[in-house]
Amino acid sequence: MNKPARGSLLGIEHLDAKDILGLLKLARRMNPLKPRPLLRGKRVVLLFYEASTRTRSSFEIAAKSLGAMTTLVQSSGSSIEKGESLLDTGYTLRAVGADCIVMRHPSAGAPLLMAQHLDIPVINAGDGMHEHPSQALLDAFTILKHKKSFKGLHATIIGDIFHSRVARSACHLLTKFGVKITLCGPPEFVPDVATTLAPGLRVTRYVEDALRGTDVVMLLRVQKERLGGQKIRLQDYVARYQMTPARLKLAKRDAILMHPGPIIRGLELTAEVADGPQAVIVDEVRNSVPTRMAILARALGKAK
Amino acid sequence: MLTAKSQKRDVASLLIKGGHLIDPAAKVNAPMDVLLRDGRVAEVALPNKIRGNADEQFDARGLIVAPGFIDLHVHLREPGQNYKETIASGTAAAAAGGFTSVCTMPNTAPVVDTPEWVVWLRSPERAAVVSVFPIAAATRASKGATLTDFSALQRAGAVAVTDDGKPILEDEIMRMALRLGAELNLPVVQHAEDTRLTEHCSMHAGPTSFRLGLRGMPASAEAAIVDRDVTLAQQIRESRLHVAHLSTTDALKAVRRGKRAKARVTCEVTPHHFTLIDENVGEYNTNLKMNPPLRTAIDVEAIVVALSDGTVDAIATDHAPHAAHEKQVEFERASFGITGLETALALAITKLHREHKIPLTRIVELFTAGPARVFDLPGRGSLARGSQADVTIFDPRKRWTFEAAKSCSLSHNSPFDGWQFTGKVVATIVGGRVVYRAD
C-alpha cells in the first residue's frame, strides 16, 4: 500500500481551497475547440464498472483534446466479468502501459484502493455513494461563470442526498469557500446526519423554506435503482419537492438551476423549469470538458 | 527463565516461583508460588513454602501469575478454510496471547452441525496446542430453520450452540433453542443482529458511514435482537442465553434488565469494541471492518463501565482471520472480521487498566473466572488446588510493539499492526506444559 500518486483526484474532501482554485483556473484556459497536444503519447484508461454517458464521453473527449490516447474498459466484456479483482485489473492496465486511470465504480472507496496500489494517478469518476469530484469541479466552474465569486452565496440541494456522490462532493467543495448550503428532502433521502458532512450545512423538509433567497438550486435525480427497499412514493415526492416555476420564483431572481443529469422531466422538475432561462443544465455538461481537461493535465503533470 | 533439572520433554511437575498470583475465582491477589503436577494444580502457597522437588522451576519474579485465559469466541476456520487459519496455527496464536482454552465457532465449511465434526475438531490430529472447546451450530447448516441435535452435540463435546455470523431471527426457533438448551443446561450463543436492518451495510450507521458513502448498520439492529432474546430467556426457566460480541449501549441495557431479573443471561465484549470507534475506519481501512461494527465513543464509554461493574462476563476476541485477498478489495466487498488473539491482553491492560483504571484483578477475571462460568468449562478459570494446570504468566508493565506480520496466525488482518502496548504475555502453560514462552 502506498500514497496515491501525485495528480490523483479521489475526492474533494481532502483537497484544499488553493488546489481547487488552481484546477478551476486551469480549466478556464482549456478549450476543447482549440486542441493542445499537452498529453501527446499518454495513455488514459477509462475504467467503467457502471453505466455512464456524460462522464465517460467528456473524459474521453477531454483526453483526446489534449492529444492522449484513450482505451475504454467496461465490466461487461472484460475479465472483470470472469471475477478478476479490482487490483488485478489495475495491475493489468498498468502493465499494458496506462499512464492514468479514470475510474467509475459502484463501491465507495474503490478508486482510493486502486490508487494505493498503483504508481500512476487515479481519477475518481464517481464511486458508489461517496464522491464525484470532477462533477463538483465542473459545477463550481459553472457557478463561477454566473456568479463571479463564491462569497456570500447560498446554495440549495434538493433530492436524494443520501445516495448521491454528487451532493457529497458539492457540499465539500462549496463549504470550503464559505457557501451556506441547505439540504432538502424527506428523511429517507436527507437524514439529519447529513449536516455532519461539512460546516455550514442545514437540513429542511420544506422546499419553500429551502428555496427562499437562494442563489444556486441544485436538483438531484431520484435514483430508483438505489432506493434499496426504501418506501417512498414517487407521487408524494413529486407533490412535495418537484421544482416548478412557482417554487423556483422563491429563489433569488438571478438564481441558477443546476442538475448533474440525467434529468427526469415530470419527476424532480417540470419541463418548463428544465428548459427555462434559469436552467444551466446543458451549460454544466459543456463545462465538463474543459474541467476534465484540467484534471487530466494536472494528473499527468502538464498543468502549465 | 526456565531452568531444566531434567531433560525429559514432558515434565511431571513445574514450580512457578516468585510471582504475584491473581486468581479471582479463589479470591487470591497476593505473592504465591504454584506447583503443577501431572496436569493439575498440586499446591498454591505463600512464597518459599512449597517443599519438595519439582522437575522444573519457572522464575516468575516481577510477573503476574493467573489462571489460563479462556477465549469464548474464536474462528479457527477448520474444517474447510485452512488457507485462513488452522486449529494448529490458531491455537499457536492463542498460546502467544496467553489463552489456554478457546471456544471455536461453527461457521466453517461445512458448518459444524453434527457430533462427528465436533469430535473431529477435538481430535489430536488437529495438533492444537491449547484446549479446544467446540461450539456447535444451533440450526442445521446455520440456516435458522431446523434445530440441530443439541444432546448429541453436547455429548460429543460441544460446550454451547450458536449460528454465529448469523442471528437466529425467527422468534419460534430461538424459543425452541433456548428451551432445548435449558433441558440440557447448554448455553445458546446469539450473534445479535437484525439482518433485516443491515442489508448491504458494511459499518456502523453514523457520520463516518455517511461521509464515506457506506450504508450503515443502526445500533438498534443489535439492541432489538438482544432485547427479544433477554425477554425469551426470562420466560423460559433455566434457559441460558449468551450474547456474543456485544457492542452497543442499548444492548447492554437489555442484558442488565435480564440480569436484574435473575435470568441466566451472560455477555462478552471484544477488545476492539472497547478500544476503537467507527471514525477509526478512516479512509476505508478494511482491517477495521467487522461485524458487529465499531460503534461510537458513547458506546465505548458504556462498555467500559459494563466491563467494570460486572454486566459483562468475559472479554472474547472474535478472532476472525482472513487472507490478504479477502481484505485487499473494495470495502463493501471485504470480509468482516479481524484477528485478535495476540493483542487481547495488551489491549485490556493498555486501555482498560492503564487508561480507564480498571483493576488488574477484574481484568484477569474477565479472561478467566468470567468466561469459565459462562460455559461451565471444567477445571478452568481458577488455580485452586486440583484445577487444570493451565496458567498464564504476564508482565503488566512490559512495553512492546505488535507486528501483524510476525503473528502466529496464518492471517494478518489486524488493525493493531504497529501499535505500542503495555502488558505482555511471558508464558502460557497448558496441562502443566509450557506451550508458549516469550523470547
Image: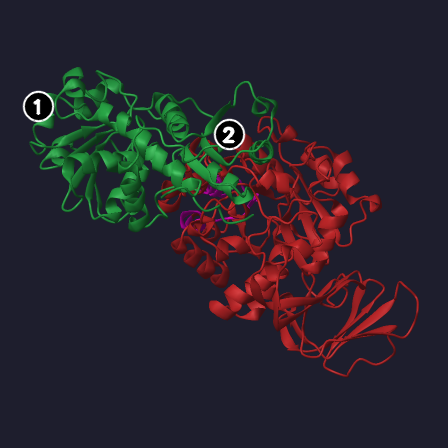
Chain colours: A green, B red
Q: Which residues are magenta?
A: B224-253
Examine the rendering and report whether any part of residue B128 can be seen: yes
Question: In which quadrant will I find the N terminus of chain B?
Answer: bottom right
Marks 1, 2: nearer the viewer: 1
Vertical relation: B18 (above or below) A175 = below
Vertical relation: A34 (above or below) B235 = above
Q: Amino acid type of disc 1?
A: Ala
Residue B43's label in the rendered image is none
Q: Chain of mark 2?
A: B
Label 1 – label 2 distance at C-alpha? 51 Å
Q: Quadrant of residue A164?
A: top left
The answer to whether residue B279 is left or right of residue A85 is left
Residue A246's label in the rendered image is 1
Examine the rendering and report whether any part of residue A165 can be seen: no
Element assignment for label 2:
loop
The residue furthest bottom is B48
Counting from the top left corner in percent of width and height, residue B385 is at: 75, 68
The residue furthest right is B7
Counting from the top left corner in percent of width and height, residue B123 is at: 81, 43
Kindly check if marks 1 and 2 are in contact, taking CB atoms under 8 A apart as contact. no
Q: Amino acid type of disc 2?
A: Glu
Counting from the top left corner in percent of width and height, residue A209 is at: 12, 35
Q: Observer-nearest residue: B69 or A235?
A: A235
Question: In which quadrant will I find the C terminus of chain B?
Answer: bottom right
Which residue corresponds to mark 2? B170
Magenta region includes residue B239: yes
Element assignment for label 1:
helix
The answer to whether residue A231 is left or right of residue B146 is left
Judge the density around disc 1: few (<14), some (14-19), many (≥20) Cα neighbours within 10 Å.
few
Vertical relation: B127 (above or below) A206 = below
Magenta region includes residue B335: no
